[in-house]
Image (spheres, rainbow, N blue to C red):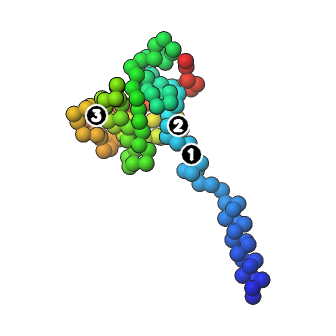
């Protein structure tokens, strides 16, 4: 009887160790997933570099665009971010990844409430597609 319990325990432990890791646990942190150049349908580029965002430029060393600090709060539902200039919040928003190559962001200005839905009508909405390797 004891041998049977021990065998069942060993089989259970072995199958738990060999079980595949769920995809959501393998995923990189949001900040890592955002890194690089993203592009809107109209051609506007968004360049995420560390905790900085450069928007509207050519994403080169000499023409990066408007620079923002972009602290993320990925553990909130929905995940939040702020776009900050010189320590002051300019925009507050939320974001959502759609696969590895699409990023949806929705944000509002300083004196407005943070959006609560990615498709919120009275906020700025952008659909970004990953452009490829980051350009420096």
Rounded to the nearest angstrom, the CA distance separating label 2 from label 1 is: 9 Å
Marks 2 and 1: CB-CB under 8 Å? yes
For image coordinates 31% across by 29% down, the residue present is 88
Label 1 neighbour load within 10 Å: few <14, some 14-19, many 20+: few
Q: Earlier in the sequence, mark 3 or mark 1?
A: 1
- Residue 106 in the image: state x and y as whole percent: 34, 36
Outermost residue on the top side: it is 62
Which residue is under mark 3? 108
Which residue is under mark 2? 33
Label 2 neighbour load within 10 Å: few <14, some 14-19, many 20+: some
Local SS, label 2:
helix
- Residue 95 in the image: state x and y as whole percent: 40, 39
Q: Quadrant of residue 92?
A: top left
Position of residue 114 in the picture relative to residue 61 (left or right): left
* Viewer can see residue 89: yes
Rounded to the nearest angstrom, the CA distance separating label 3 from label 1 is: 28 Å
Q: Quadrant of residue 28?
A: top right
In this rendered view, identify the residue nearer to me: 33 or 70.
Answer: 70
Which residue is under mark 1? 27
Marker disc for residue 118: none
* Viewer can see residue 39: no
Work out whether 95 lies above or below 129: below
């Amino acid at each position: 009887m004891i041998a049977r319990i021990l065998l069942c325990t060993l089989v259970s432990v072995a199958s738990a160790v060999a079980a595949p890791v769920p995809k959501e646990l393998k995923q990189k942190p949001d900040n890592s997933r955002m890194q690089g150049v993203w592009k809107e349908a109209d051609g506007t580029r968004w360049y995420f570099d560390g905790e900085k965002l450069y928007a509207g430029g050519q994403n080169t060393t000499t023409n990066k665009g408007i620079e923002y600090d972009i602290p993320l709060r990925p553990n909130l539902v929905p995940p939040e971010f702020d776009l900050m200039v010189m320590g002051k919040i300019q925009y507050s928003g939320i974001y959502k990844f759609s696969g590895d190559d699409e990023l949806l962001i929705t944000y509002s200005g300083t004196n407005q409430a943070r959006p609560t839905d990615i498709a919120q009508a009275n906020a700025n909405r952008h659909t970004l597609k990953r452009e490829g390797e980051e350009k420096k």
